[in-house]
Image (tube, rainbow, N blue to C red):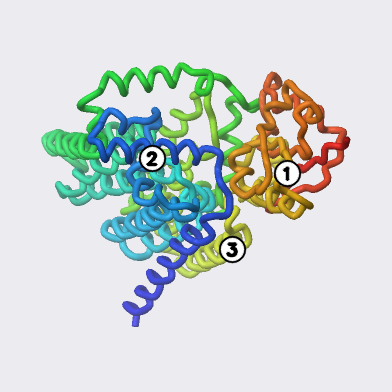
């Protein structure tokens, strides 16, 4: 009976993982995806000719994104182009659940699996052609395999630590925080006598070797044109795009992101961490090491100039695993209460996702939703609805719209478009625009930014129509009067 029940739970988990990630994939277009479409097209062309130099398109470096995108980049719709990545990331959540089960049993694995399945930020970034969800899930897999190696001393686990670490770095360079974690975590395991120095040295060699082999297979440019990759990366990191502070919040950006994107259960799990660590148990080391990774990664991004909520995704998915281990600890003494909390939180979070889908990017932690007021948020969601609204106007093909994130807006718009950035130097009348579409991402910018200037100019104008998501205003549509 118990076996059939467990199988049913894993079946339900599989549906919970895949459904929100692979359905309605063609709803809206994020502003970064057209660039990754071009990168992937160039990558495919390089694959066909054997030109490994052009595997490298830009510094993130997004190599994993390009490999997965190459499977469907020839498709016509964005839903089709995103599907291989969405399927891979859904399978990755299942894989993390599987390896957690190997080390700590069904209860922790199922809890973590459902928390990841309904993590709104993870769902949102599993549905776009980008790198952040790949970075988050590859980092999780690497950490869990590293923990399993400490626990079971299996060569395969430390080799897979190296492979998934390489995949994380090939997704995004901020994964070097993961490398720091593995070094520090291994040293702590030695000091706590979980592994020996000889075992650690041997494991480190295997980890580095597996990582290098993975890197060379997927990104041979690092071997054949290292100077080209290095110069390209250094040039990018010195550009205004990377160095200029565009948000008014500065160092408060990520503390606010923490409040907005966590779930209530994650907050509860973090609050209960001291109780889970109070006595020695099988979950103590995993909790400590996931906290260590979260701290290292948070500090890495906290002191970078360029900021974005999605950059913190590896921390948020780590909170899911920490919460699962905390509940596992508390469940040993308070099984019924822990089960009630788990079921209640999963039902509530699933309900939230159902209401938000396919606009999971509009999620806010209900305990701290007010923090979002006036803050830079939004990555294209809602601009599809603005386009649909204007498509209903008479003769929409002849309308000219000045829109923020004009590429995202244009994907669904039948008429002509131009960038709202022009409004920083010209009036809508000078542009010849019929409508102006402003977006909430313009809020919370630095005082010198053109977005701040344009919002001030339109502050006393009444929009013809407002697009709202999750009870927040996202898009303001202004008719340009003759």
Label 3: which residue?
A: 354
Whether tag 3 and tag 2 are in contact, CB under 8 A, the answer is no
Residue at 43% x, 38% y is 294
Residue 434 badge: none
Left or right of 394 on screen, residue 314: left
| Residue density around tag 3, few if under 14, some if 14–19, many if 20 or more, within 10 Å | some
In the image, residue 73 sits, relative to residue 226, either above or below, namely below
Label 1: which residue?
A: 398
Q: CA distance from mark 2 to mark 1?
A: 33 Å
Between discs 3 and 1, the one toward the N terminus:
3
Residue at 41% x, 59% y is 113
**Horizontal and vertical percent for residue 424?**
72, 23
Residue 180: quadrant of the picture: top left
In-front residue for pair 147/443: 443
| Nearest to viewer (mark 3 / mark 1) | 1
| Residue density around tag 1, few if under 14, some if 14–19, many if 20 or more, within 10 Å | few
In the image, residue 460 sits, relative to residue 75, either above or below, namely above
Image quarter in which the N terminus is found: bottom left
The local secondary structure at tag 1 comes to helix
The local secondary structure at tag 3 comes to helix
Residue at 52% x, 50% y is 124
In the image, residue 132 sits, relative to residue 227, either above or below, namely below
Image quarter in which the C terminus is found: top right
Evaluate whether residue 190 shows in this view: no
| Residue density around tag 2, few if under 14, some if 14–19, many if 20 or more, within 10 Å | many
| Nearest to viewer (mark 2 / mark 1) | 1
Residue at 86% x, 36% y is 461
**Horizontal and vertical percent for residue 342?**
50, 63
């Amino acid at each position: 009976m118990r076996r059939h029940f467990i199988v049913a739970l894993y079946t339900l988990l599989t549906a919970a993982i895949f459904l929100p990630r692979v359905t309605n994939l063609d709803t809206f277009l994020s502003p970064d995806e057209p660039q990754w479409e071009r990168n992937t097209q160039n990558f495919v062309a390089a694959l066909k000719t054997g030109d490994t130099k052009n595997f490298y398109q830009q510094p993130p470096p997004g190599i994993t994104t390009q490999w997965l995108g190459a499977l469907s980049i020839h498709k016509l719709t964005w839903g089709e182009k995103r599907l291989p990545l969405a399927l891979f990331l859904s399978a990755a959540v299942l894989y993390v659940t599987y390896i957690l089960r190997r080390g700590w049993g069904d209860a922790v694995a199922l809890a973590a699996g459902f928390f990841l399945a309904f993590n709104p930020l993870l769902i949102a970034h599993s549905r776009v052609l980008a790198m952040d969800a790949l970075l988050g899930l590859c980092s999780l897999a690497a950490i869990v395999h590293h923990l399993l190696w400490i626990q079971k001393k299996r060569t395969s686990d430390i080799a897979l630590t190296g492979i998934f670490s390489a995949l994380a770095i090939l997704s995004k360079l901020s994964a070097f925080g993961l490398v720091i974690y593995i070094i520090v975590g291994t040293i702590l395991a030695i000091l706590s006598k979980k592994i020996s120095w000889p075992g650690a040295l041997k494991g480190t060699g295997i980890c580095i070797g597996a990582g290098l082999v993975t890197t060379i297979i997927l990104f041979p440019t690092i071997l054949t044109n290292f100077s080209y990759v290095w110069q390209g990366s250094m040039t990018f990191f010195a550009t205004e795009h990377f160095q200029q502070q565009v948000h008014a919040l500065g160092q408060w950006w990520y503390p606010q992101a923490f409040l907005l994107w966590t779930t209530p259960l994650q907050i509860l799990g973090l609050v209960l961490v001291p109780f889970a660590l109070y006595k020695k148990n099988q979950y103590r080391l995993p909790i400590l090491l996931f906290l260590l990774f979260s701290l290292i990664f948070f500090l890495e991004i906290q002191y970078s100039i360029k900021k974005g909520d999605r950059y913190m995704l590896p921390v948020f998915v780590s909170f899911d695993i920490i919460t699962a281990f905390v509940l596992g600890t508390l469940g040993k003494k308070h099984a019924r209460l822990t089960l009630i909390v788990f079921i209640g939180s999963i039902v509530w979070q699933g309900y939230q996702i159902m209401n938000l889908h396919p606009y999971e990017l509009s999620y806010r932690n209900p305990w701290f939703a007010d923090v979002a007021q006036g803050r830079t948020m939004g990555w294209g969601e809602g601009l599809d609805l603005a386009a649909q609204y204007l498509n209903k106007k008479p003769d929409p093909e002849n309308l000219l719209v000045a829109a923020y994130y004009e590429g995202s807006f244009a994907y669904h718009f039948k008429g002509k478009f131009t960038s709202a950035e022009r409004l920083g130097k010209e009036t809508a009348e000078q542009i010849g625009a019929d409508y102006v579409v402003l977006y909430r991402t313009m809020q919370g910018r630095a005082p010198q930014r053109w977005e701040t200037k344009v919002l001030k100019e339109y502050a006393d104008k009444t929009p013809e129509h407002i697009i709202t998501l999750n009870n927040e205003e996202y898009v303001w549509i202004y008719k340009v009067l003759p």
